[in-house]
Amino acid sequence: MTSRRTAGAWAESPAPAPAVLDVLIPTAGRVAELAVTLAGLAAQDDPPFDVVISDQSDDDAPSHPAVAAMRRVLQAQGRGVHVHRHLPRRGLAEQRQFLLDSSSADAVLFLDDDVWLEPGQLTRMHDALHELDCGLVGMAVQGLSYLGDDRPAEREAFEPWGDRVEPERLSRDSAAFERWRLHNAANLAHVARDVPLPDRGWLPYRVAWIGGCVMFRRDALIEAGGFEFWRELGSRHSGEDVLAQWRVMSRRGGAGLLPSGAVHLEAPTTIPDRPVDAFDVMDV
């Protein structure tokens, strides 16, 4: 028995299972991509989760028929779906802090609005977060248009964790920063092809950071200050996710998970102007 109600029970109205995970989705100006992202969530069985969307679109993207349909599917499945119209725009970090403030579950997944998740990935991430007893885990998004683009040199940075995930302090100047190349293109798909997995079906590895799909222990993220540093940044910034992850990793540790079932939709960015990386101007 899973927490996801299937079609035969959609017209029933039992109380949904209490959410142990909040999926937090910042969105602005995307319709097709947001609908696909929600469709990926609708294919997840466990753990029980709610979805929180912070919308900064000019045209109310969550009310578009395709997105609204997927919201209804999730609700029929027994998921709480909460949409907040959040304007004016004050930058990426403020948008993420708003989502964090809108959550209450013990675990929070920051999921970008252009990422599709393979069925079973929420279970895998949630299990790993607790089994590894660390501050965060994530699945680096992969561009499947690059499946034919094998990059062995970029995969050399792959290093599994051992029995424990330990805290790490990272910066742009640290050797560990070069691990970022591991998440280019479809590198993780090629790593998964070549690296044997343990019986549990996933393997934790060391990361520089993880973009697009990161699950935190909520208390660990709050302990590290969350994204409250938005107040010290201008609105035109990026790298806020990196800074928050580094602060959590320095205290509680973090890991990427292999294989990654997170697929980047490869849509054009909605934030082309990024003159400041938060992790370059703020202390970890």
Image (cartoon, grey):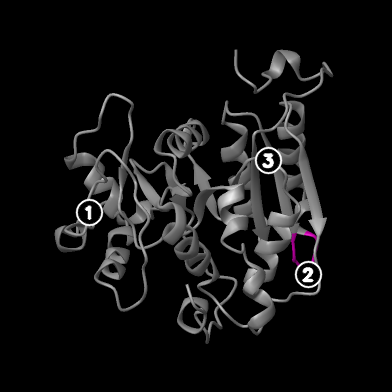
Q: Give the foreground label among 1 and 3.
A: 3
Query: Mark 3 belongs to which amino acid?
Result: Ala
Tell me residue 247's x, y (percent). Answer: 49, 64
In the rendered structure, the answer to whether residue 154 lies left or right of residue 103 reads: left
Q: Tell me where the magenta segment starts and ends, as one range.
A: 55-60
Circles 2 and 1, Cβ within 8 Å, touching? The answer is no
Marked residue nearer the N-terminal end (1 or 3)? 3
Q: Is residue 37 magenta?
A: no
Tell me residue 121's x, y (percent). Answer: 47, 36
Marked residue nearer the N-terminal end (3 or 2)? 2
**What residue is rendered at 52% in x and 80% in y?**
282
**What residue is rendered at 40% in x and 38% in y?**
132
Q: Is residue 251 above or below residue 23?
A: below
- SS label for mark 2: loop
**What residue is rendered at 61% in x and 64% in y?**
225
The label number, if any, that marks residue 105 in the structure image: 3
Residue that badge 1 annotates: 158
Badge 3: residue crowd in 10 Å (few <14, some 14–19, many ≥20): some
Dominant secondary-structure state across the stretch colored magenta: loop
Q: Is residue 125 above or below residue 155?
A: above
Q: CA distance from mark 3 to mark 2?
A: 29 Å
Tell me residue 258's x, y (percent). Answer: 32, 42
